[in-house]
Image (spheres, rainbow, N blue to C red):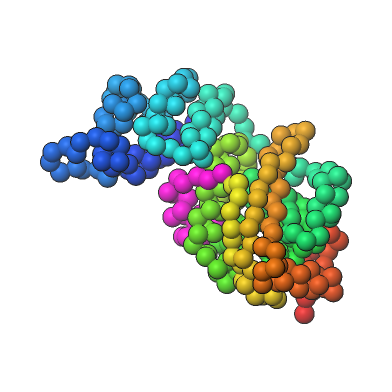
Amino acid sequence: MDNRSDIRDFLVSRRAKITPERAGLLPGGGRRRVPGLRREEVAVLAGVSTDWYTRLEKGHIAGVSEDVLEAVARALQLDEAERTYLFDLARAAARPTRTPQRRSRAPIQPRVQWMLDSMTGSAAFVANGRLDILATNTLGWALHSPLFDDPRRPANFARFQFLDPQARAYYQDWDGAANVTVALLRAEAGRRPHDTQLRELVGELSTVSEEFRTRWAAHDVRIHHNGAKQFHHPVVGTLDLGYHTLDLPTEDHSGLRLTIYTAEPGSPSEDGLKLLASWAATTAAPTAGDAAAPAPDRT
């Protein structure tokens, strides 16, 4: 497919982040016209000609060997997520152009829902690469209840983050959460360039939100593994939670991921999760895991 603009913008943005000193090069004399490294400096570091690297940076990546891509990744000091994204762009460029596909929502197997429902002390959910919530346990629904106020299904983290005013109060570090959200979507765009629904989501958010547009243009990417996040829930207040995200194997390779939020034992946040579970048990919550249900009336 023709993804030359994505390749160009990504490589230029990564090159701009590397100073000659950081790359181990002696600073050149005179005024530098560009931030970061020059093309010829990246070429030297990667062991290729300047003309060849210039062609690569213009988006001509199809057919480039993995060894050369590895050399460019090292020269630009790409992290794991950035390296994966570069290789995804190369694979997409090598495939014949085809009509974008509208991917149907992957069905959640009953055994996955059983697993979610068994996690009574943790907030757990399954999402796809577009950040749609496809299944959740009761505590996962309760933790993310502000997302389900929007009647559209499936609930989507990116739409909530950038289009719902509640998000800035819900995420204690809204800027950091917004950066992660966009970086995850950018990485997914590299993996699944023909996903029409992803393109539509990006188009919608780009049209409405300047905050999203700015972050999307930065070409930052991320792979979600684990970390910590702080929420301010409208019912129980502040929650400091750790999370782990695991790939969920599916027969159609739909790229689903299981995320589990837990609190430190004996902490105020553990008490908060228990209180949240009690609230969910007495609220008109949807059946556990029914992420497609309309938002309940919590008045």
Question: In the picture shown, does residue 200 fall above or below 270?
Answer: above
Q: Is residue 194 something one can see in this rendering?
A: yes
Q: What residue do we see at 53% from left, 45% from top?
A: 222
Most prominent secondary structure in the magenta stretch?
Answer: helix
Closer-to-camera residue (147/271)? 271
Closer-to-camera residue (97/251)? 251
Where is residue 76 drawn, in percent x and y? 37, 35
Q: What residue do we see at 32% from left, 22% from top?
A: 47
Question: In the picture shown, does residue 240 fall above or below 40?
Answer: below
Q: Tell which residue pokes out farthest to the front in this image.
A: 266
- Which quadrant holds the C terminus? bottom right
Could you tell whether 94 is left or right of 147 in the image? left
Q: What residue do we see at 75% from left, 45% from top?
A: 105
Q: Is residue 133 magenta?
A: no
Identify the image quadrant of residue 125: bottom right
Disc tally is 0
Identify the image quadrant of residue 227: bottom right
Q: What residue do we see at 64% from left, 62% from top?
A: 241
Q: Is residue 221 magenta?
A: yes
Residue range in magenta is 204-223
Q: Tell which residue pokes out farthest to the bottom in this image.
A: 299
